[in-house]
Amino acid sequence: MKPVFADTAYWVALANPKDGLHQAARSLKERLSGAQRYTTEEVLTEFLTMFSSQGTWLREVAVTMVRAIEDDPDTLVIPQSSSSFHQGLRLYADRPDKKYSLQDCVSMNAMRSRGITTVLTSDHHFEQEGLSILLKRER
């Protein structure tokens, strides 16, 4: 099974039962059991930020989940670095016509450097870079 990259939208959908993609994320988690997943510390930072003002319960869920992600042998958490920031900034600057966040750019670079082309996200920006997203909203 090919490795996949787990973006913030995936972790948020898994953590929050009220998220519209919660069931889809759970199904993907089961379907991809045993597959190597990659994510970044920057993604986990963004994930925690998403829940910082959502109340005590979801905040605790987020902390518990990040700790579980870090301990999961099937998930490699790529450390943040000055290099990842500056490479992300370079891609961000190179795409003035896109609405990519710096975080998207850091993630895209992490994927490219590892030859990963599939991402657990609903963020269409990854498709704009020729990557395949697995978490799609029903139309």
Image (cartoon, helix red, strand yellow):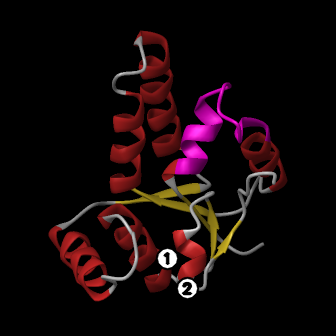
On screen, residue 45 above or below 98: above
- Residues rendered magenta in the picture: 9-23
Left or right of 96: which side holds 18? right
Q: Which of the pair 38/126 is nearer the observer?
A: 126
Residue 40 in the image, given as x and y percentages of width and height: 40, 59
* Residue at image point 27% right, 61% down: 80
* Residue type marked 1: Met
Placement of 82 over or under 112, stated as above or below: above
- SS class of the residue under badge 1? helix
Whether residue 123 appears in magenta in the rendering, the answer is no
Query: Is 16 a magenta residue?
Result: yes
Residue beneath the point at 49% across and 19% down: 58
Residue type at mark 2?
Gly
Residue 127, placed above or below residue 120: below
What residue is shown with label 1?
Answer: 111
Number of numbered markers: 2
The label shown at residue 115 is 2
* Other residues around mark 2 within 10 Å, as few (<14) / some (14–19) / many (≥20): few
Q: Residue at x 41, y 29 (%)?
A: 51
Residue at x 56%, y 61% (from the top left corner) = 123
Front in this rendered view, residue 103 or 116: 103
Q: Quadrant of residue 103?
A: bottom left
Horizontal and vertical percent position of residue 109: 40, 79
Does the image show residue 111? yes
Left or right: 63 in relation to 15 = left
Label 2 SS? loop
Query: Which quadrant of the rendered structure holds the C terminus?
Result: bottom right
Query: Residue 108, image x and y in percent?
Result: 45, 75
